[in-house]
Amino acid sequence: MARRRTATQTVTMPPPLRFDQKLVLNQYLLSLFEVTKLEDLARDMKGPEWEGLDENNVSRFYHHLTNRLYDRAQLPKDLLLTYDQNIVRHTLAIRGKRERPITWKYFQYLALLFTEIYLDRYFRDPEKLLADLNDWVEKFNAGVGAADRVNPYTLADLRKLAFWNATGSGKTLLMHVNILQYRHYLALHGREKELSRVILLTPNEGLSRQHEEEFALSGLPAQIFSKDGAGLYKGQYIEIIDIHKLKDEMGEKTVAVEAFEGNNLVLVDEGHRGSSGEDWKAKRDKLCAEGFSFEYSATFGQAMKASGKAALIQEYAKCILFDYSYKYFYRDGYGKDYQILNLANDSDDEIRQRYLTACLLTFYQQLRLFKDKQREYAPYLLEKPLLVFVGSKVTAVRSENKRKVSDVVDILLFLNDFISKPYLTQRHLKRLLENRPDLPDHKGREIFAGAFGYLIKQGFTPETLYQDMLKNLFNAQILGTLHVERFKQTGEIGLRVANNEYFGVINVGDDSELAKLCEENGLHTTALDFSDSLFRSLNDKNSQVNLLIGSKKFSEGWNSWRVSTMGLMNVGKNEGSEIIQLFGRGVRLKGKDFSLKRTVLGPGTPDYINKVETLNVFGIRADYMRQFQEYLEEEGLPPDDKKAEITLPVIRLTPGRNLKYLKLKDGLDFKKHGPNPVLGRPNKVLLKRPVVVDYYPKLQAIISGKATANAESIVKQTGQITAAHLSLLNWESIYFELQRYKNERGWHNLCLSRQIMQDLLHQPDWYVLYIPKDELEFTDFARVRRWQEIAVTLLKNTVSVTITITRVPGKGKEWNWWIWRSTAKNWRRKGK
């Protein structure tokens, strides 16, 4: 008799998911494009050739997304074109007073497109959107462990969208367009009067002022909140308020949350705030309880990890619409490269002084390169480098070498030693230039080996290098000691050597207490009643300030393209999100032709430009730096010692072979010199190829994905807009919409008339309209808005398709140009 064998089964649990893998709303939007990852959707659309608009003011990204044989079941071409036209219109609207036109990068365009899709579905039928999302959540939960499952959506969950976009990726402009998108869909559905206020919440007054300036550039009416502001126009003005002004009860300088109750559109900058137990999240949730909210942050992932709150993770997993966090930003080549160092133990004063000297020398090399190669670097739009020192504690003191110092005072004492002790400083400079192996990393390698090649190539000796650093970094034309001067009027502290030009500025909350600490530690300290702000002039072209010292407040509410080296003093784990914010501001880069990208080294690129396009981070007792670098590696970014430079081959087009184009006689412009086209009755040729408008996709947008998958099997009905329908339409609105449309497309010479529009729609032989019969029956006034939308769509299509015969002088003969579909660039030519 055979013995029974007892089998044990091992149940393998799937590994826990990172937060970015739980973003069910983002995954749902990607599924509508029939992809699972952003990389798949964005493949081949990252090049600059896809940026901008074509000659008809249609985004080239639209052409890329629709360049396939079959329509996407959920997002047909006509629907994507409608969304694109909205994005273009809003983009032109915020052009405002800006020096250069707004040209979206692929990730910015996709973020706006995702918003269009979501808002369209939300306003058309929120119940159906809720059902679709919960079907998606059910599918998601089936493939993950119990700990990673996402709770079903509720209707309240649909009122909140969040954008996880890296610092420097243009969140501010996205916010401006988001406001216009939301207002557009309110108006489209006749609900614009429901909006009570538009409120922007910020974490501090500095960021509030910055947003007010940005709104002014975009031509959007906005003001920092005051109790006597806006009045009857409160729904039109964007009211900016920092969260600390919101309290439970009214006060002299604060306002109760209840004063804002209503159907508000609430925008939250630095949306990660409130995840660490602060009560401002409860306040902002109350503000938009009956309305809608958009949130923006570069550090949602870090904030969720730090909070560890399951409810918060659930909430943001269901509301983050678009994920373009730093890992995508860096992989795509945007922003500066980075190098992160940390001196975990600075008990050896000799090592500490040499490490800080290396920090100054690294920055000085960037400064010297910028000065010496200004002409070569000009096309790359580099700004003058700036060194930023950040202390964890500004006035909180600790005992060190029998002195009471704070982090900021510690930095100042080092600077004073560097300036006033030339022999000690030159000794450290000598060891750094000689690459002595006395500052090794965790693998025993000298961390500054080869770091100062440009300075060595210039033939500097420690003595001449010291003198040049005093002159160009510290603006010291004459030698002297460090002077710490407090500006009573601005609350800043200026730094200079003797009576030379100011080389540095300290911007902290308690400047008077810091000045007292400086005086107690023997620094030459004075106070001035009147002085201009050095901090506010940092971004001026003629600013002589090379050094900024402060606290973590710079992580929010301050923008500059100058930051190139950072020193972080005594930063701990609890400052993680703020330091990442600061890091994000440091890696911002304009790039060549304002591409936002760092330079790919290769033939023709200037020498050492990678040195200036690298953010160097020097941590001193900065416990978080190691964890931050580990986080970047977890996200798939290369560690410093494994980065590889890749030089791409130069690809040149062969004229006449790679590009086909139509050539006109010199001095002629088709739009300027050809006869003005007039919208009119289609001729016999066009009547054989009628305009086709399929309204089923918009209806299917509120049908579940399962039903839509079988859309091909649906027998579509056709219908026509009759005189009874037309009698209820707002013809003024239709006329101005068509005028706006032709201006957006750049068809400024096209002549339109109200009468022709009405005549065209009264003779429906030129179009085919696919629409369910019952959609043309009058049941409520909501149907009238739908008919008006259909009428506008039909007229827009006939504007694009109508034949215009224009005689264009050529070389010895004339040609008739038949424009069939300018949006598709389908040109036919017939010789006369």
Image (cartoon, rainbow, N blue to C red):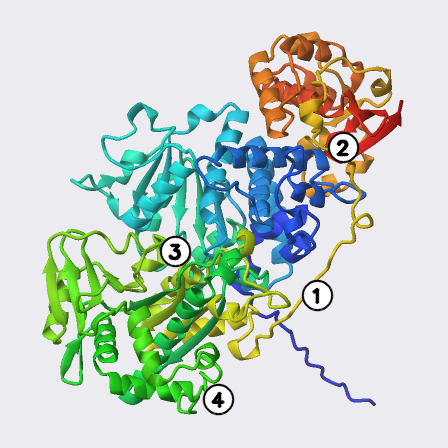
669 or 594: nearer the eye? 669
In the rendered structure, which disc, 2 or 3, sits on the residue that comes first in sequence? Answer: 3
Query: What amino acid type is highlighted by mark number 4?
Result: Arg
798 displayed left or right of 295: right
**Which of pointers 2 and 3 indicates the residue nearer the eye?**
2
**What's the amino acid at mark 2?**
Leu
Q: Is residue 168 something that shows in the picture?
A: yes
Q: Are marks 2 and 1 in contact (CB under 8 Å)?
A: no
- Residues marked 2 and 4 touching at CB (< 8 Å): no
Q: For residue 482, which quarter of the picture?
A: bottom left
| Residue at figure coordinates x 62%, y 21% from the top left | 738
- Residue type highlighted by circle 1: Pro
Dot 3 corresponds to which residue? Answer: 560
Element at label 1: loop
Identify the disc placed on residue 445.
Answer: 4
Mark linked to residue 664: 2
- Binning the other alpha carbons within 10 Å of mark 3 as few (below 14), some (14 to 19) or many (20 upward) gives few
Q: Earlier in the sequence, mark 1 or mark 4?
A: 4
Q: Earlier in the sequence, mark 4 or mark 3?
A: 4
Percent position of residue 818, x then y? 81, 25
Compute the Cα span from label 1 to label 4: 33 Å
Mark 4 or mark 2, which is nearer the start of the sequence?
A: 4
- Residue hosting label 1: 649
CB-based contact (under 8 Å), mark 2 and mark 3: no
